[in-house]
Structures are given as structure tokens and as C-alpha cells.
Image (spheres, grey):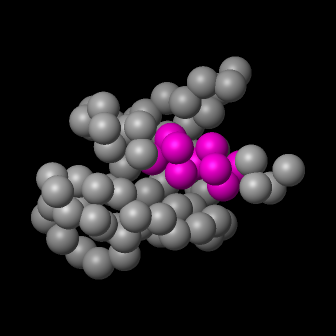
Amino acid sequence: MQNLFTTTINIHSKNLAYRVVFDHEQYKFIPETPDASAPSFSFKRENDTWHDQDNMAADVKQQAIGALENYLMAQL
């Protein structure tokens, strides 16, 4: 498991801190503090397309993908 970065995702009008790691070909979002309103979730990238591994709200998915793309673009 490789730690990549931390980010904040707005879920249910709460800004929640997440640690993003790369593990077994997946980008996993792990809440910094345990909270029932802060679920863990993950994505896999195949053929330049993000696939979420969990059913999630569209706005949360958009924020997470944006954070991933910003991170990956900064690595170039």
C-alpha cells in the first residue's frame, strides 16, 4: 500500500479529510478520522476511464475523480 496524498471531500455538507492510497491496482480513499458519515471508497483506472468500486453519489464521485486527476497531472 502506497500513500499518495490527502484531500477533503464534501459529503452531506461536511468537509471530510481522506488519505488516498494506491493498493492492488486501486486508488483507495480512507477517512482520516473514523466517522459513520465518512465512508471508505475506491476507484480503478482502465483505458483512461475511472471505475468506482462502490455505489456512490455523483457529487462525491466527481470530487474524488477531480482529486485523483489533479494528483496524477502534478506527477507529470
Image point (74%, 47%), residue name: 73
Image point (52%, 62%), residue name: 20
Image point (80%, 55%), residue name: 75
Magenta region, residue range: 64-72
Give the x, y percent position of residue 39. Answer: 26, 56
Give the x, y percent position of residue 53. Answer: 41, 36
Judging depth in this view, the residue of 18 and 41 nearest the camera is 18
Horizontal relation, residue 30 to residue 13: left or right: right
Residue extending farthest front = 13
Image point (64%, 50%), residue name: 70
Q: Main secondary structure of the magenta part?
A: helix
Query: Is residue 53 among what the camera can see?
Result: yes
Query: Is residue 24 among what the camera can see?
Result: no
Residue 67 vertical placement versus 48 (above, below): below
Horizontal relation, residue 28 to residue 72: left or right: left
Judging depth in this view, the residue of 57 and 46 nearest the camera is 57
Quadrant location of the N terminus in the rendered image: bottom right
Give the x, y percent position of residue 37. Answer: 15, 61
Whether residue 70 appears in magenta in the rendering, the answer is yes
Residue 55 vertical placement versus 21 (above, below): above
Dividing the picture into quarters, in which one does residue 60 lie? Answer: top left
| Total count of labels | 0
Give the x, y percent position of residue 41. Answer: 37, 49
Dividing the picture into quarters, in which one does residue 50 lie? Answer: top right
Residue extending farthest right = 76
Whether residue 46 appears in magenta in the rendering, the answer is no
